[in-house]
Image (cartoon, rainbow, N blue to C red):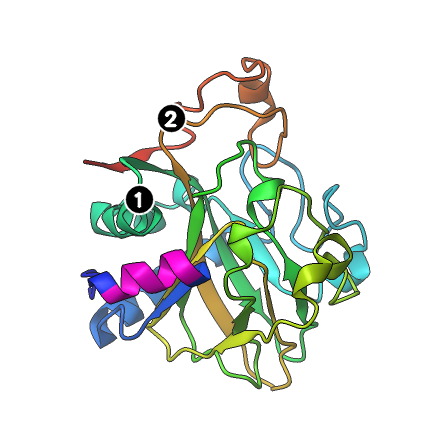
Amino acid sequence: MNCHLDENQVEYYRTNGFVVIDDFLSAEELEHWRETVIYAVARRNGRKMPGKNLKTGEADGINEDAAYYGKVFDQLLNLWQTDEGVKELMLDDRIGKMAADLAGVEGIRIWHDQALFKRPWANPTSWHLDTPFWSFSDRKALSIWVALDDATLENGCLFFIPGSCHETTFENKGIGKNMDSIFEVYPQFLRTNAVKAPMKAGSCSFHNGLTIHGANANMTSGFRRAMTCAYMPDGNTFNGTANILPEEYLKTLSLEDPLNNDAQNPLIYHR
């Protein structure tokens, strides 16, 4: 695993809100990740996440247009909680250290993982932010996005609005039909040139949860599969948003309670 970050990569991330790391996984590691994730997704049988009765593609309170959203990507969350192979991948402290180094924080917890599979001819992923969906509010939260297939301009690679994380807030738009809805909230970026991020399979990117990002439609007859994980800096507290938290756990939480339950949000790295 190519887990060393140099000063230039860290500086680029902190300036632009994202960074691409080529050849993150070796050929053998890529094959292992691909087999592990595909097996875990198949075992889920379309169930979106543990503790909730949603199927992938159904309206979830964030993206209500199920018919459209169901054709953006298949999204299955917290596979680490239901598959030992994915758990081993996601709890790797080397990745946790990378996230902590980029964010400039002492400790990193998993918020949630998610497999994001764009099927052939899938709809585009509209411009959006990540952190405003989550149950904590931290400007340093971030995600890794690992390409399990080549992510190309034709099949739905990521695009980023560079530097947007320095000006965005926790106001957001859902992932809907209109690609440009986010710019109703952040019109200052309407004329900013997006940066495309095609990646060979086995490469990855990290992006800040307040960086505006989206993805092309899949204009091909093949899949564009990615495995991702969202990270919460250690020490965060509950902001009242349910997001992926199970109902039984939510019943135990009050506003500003620490989110330090290792069964739900494991600490994978601390300095």
Instruction: State how far apart marks 2 and 1 are (Cα).
Output: 14 Å
The residue sitting at 52% across, 53% down in the picture is 165
| Quadrant showing the C terminus | top left
In terms of depth relative to the viewer, which is nearer, 118 or 186? Answer: 186
Does residue 103 sit above or below 223 in this rendering?
above
Determine the secondary structure under disc 1. Answer: loop
* Range shown magenta: 8-15
- 173 w.r.t. 218: above or below: above
- For the residue marked with disc 2, what is the amino acid? Gly
Q: Secondary structure at mark 2?
A: loop
- Position of residue 131 relative to residue 125, above or below, is above
Residue 232 placement (x, y as % from top left): 42, 38
- Numbered badge on residue 180: none
Q: Which residue is mark 2?
A: 235
Crowding at dot 1, Cα within 10 Å, few <14 / some 14-19 / many 20+, comes out as few
Q: Is 151 on the left-hand or right-hand side of 200?
A: right
Residue at the front extreme of this rendering: 188
Residue at left 29%, top 35%?
107
- On the image, the x and y values in percent for residue 5 come to 22, 61
Q: Quadrant of the N terminus?
A: bottom left
- What residue appears at the point 27 percent right and 35 percent down from the top-left corner? 106
Q: Is residue 138 magenta?
A: no
Of the numbered discs 2 and 1, the one sitting upstream in the chain is: 1
Residue 222 as seen in the image, left or right of residue 183: left
Is the residue marked by circle 2 packed among few (<14), some (14-19), or many (20+) residues within 10 Å? some
Q: Amino acid at mark 1?
A: Gly
Residue 179 horizontal/vertical position (percent): 73, 67
Q: Nearer the viewer, residue 34 or 265?
A: 265
Residue 133 x, y percent position in the rendering: 62, 42
Judged by its main secondary structure, the magenta piece is helix
Residue 124 in view, yes or no: yes
Residue located beneath label 1 in the image: 104
